[in-house]
Image (cartoon, rainbow, N blue to C red):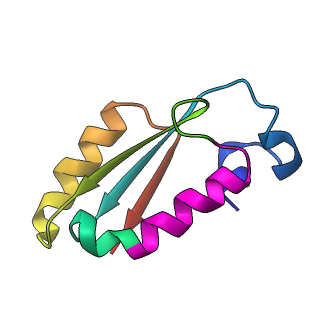
């Protein structure tokens, strides 16, 4: 599904020459997000999206404080990410 978000079919992912930026906002902290984030990143790698080559992932963590979500979202939107993943 991430390929559809990025406008690239899975078969094309290995051949892409464009760099994509994914922004992530997590309600939790990095340790709590890891069990969900690692499979997400592995799935992207399987599709040919390689961090540092054609992909950058910018993760932000609210540390359990939902009041921080708005500021974190604004920050990533200002950075013009291609895809924004928001997780509870």
- Percent x, y for residue 10? 82, 51
Main secondary structure along the magenta-highlighted residues: helix
- Percent x, y for residue 24? 38, 54
Query: Which image quadrant: the C terminus?
Result: bottom left
Q: Nearer the viewer, residue 39 or 79?
A: 39
Left or right: where 24 falls relative to 45: left
Q: Which residues are magenta?
A: 35-49
Left or right: where 6 falls relative to 61: right
Q: Nearer the viewer, residue 2 or 46?
A: 46
Q: Which residue lies at the image location 17% right of the left edge and 62% below the top edge?
A: 62
- Percent x, y for residue 7? 73, 43
Q: Is residue 47 magenta?
A: yes
Left or right: where 85 falls relative to 29: right
Left or right: where 73 falls relative to 49: left
Vertical arrangement, residue 12 with respect to residue 86, above or below: above
Query: Which image quadrant: the N terminus?
Result: bottom right
Give the residue furthest to the top.
17
């Amino acid at each position: 599904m991430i390929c559809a978000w990025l406008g690239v079919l899975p078969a094309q992912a290995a051949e892409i020459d464009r760099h994509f930026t994914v922004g992530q906002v997590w309600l939790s902290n990095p340790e709590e997000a890891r069990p969900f984030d690692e499979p997400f990143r592995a799935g992207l790698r399987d599709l040919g999206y390689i961090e540092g080559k054609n992909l950058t992932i910018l993760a932000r963590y609210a540390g359990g404080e939902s009041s921080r979500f708005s500021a974190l979202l604004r920050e990533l939107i200002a950075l013009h990410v291609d895809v924004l993943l928001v997780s509870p």
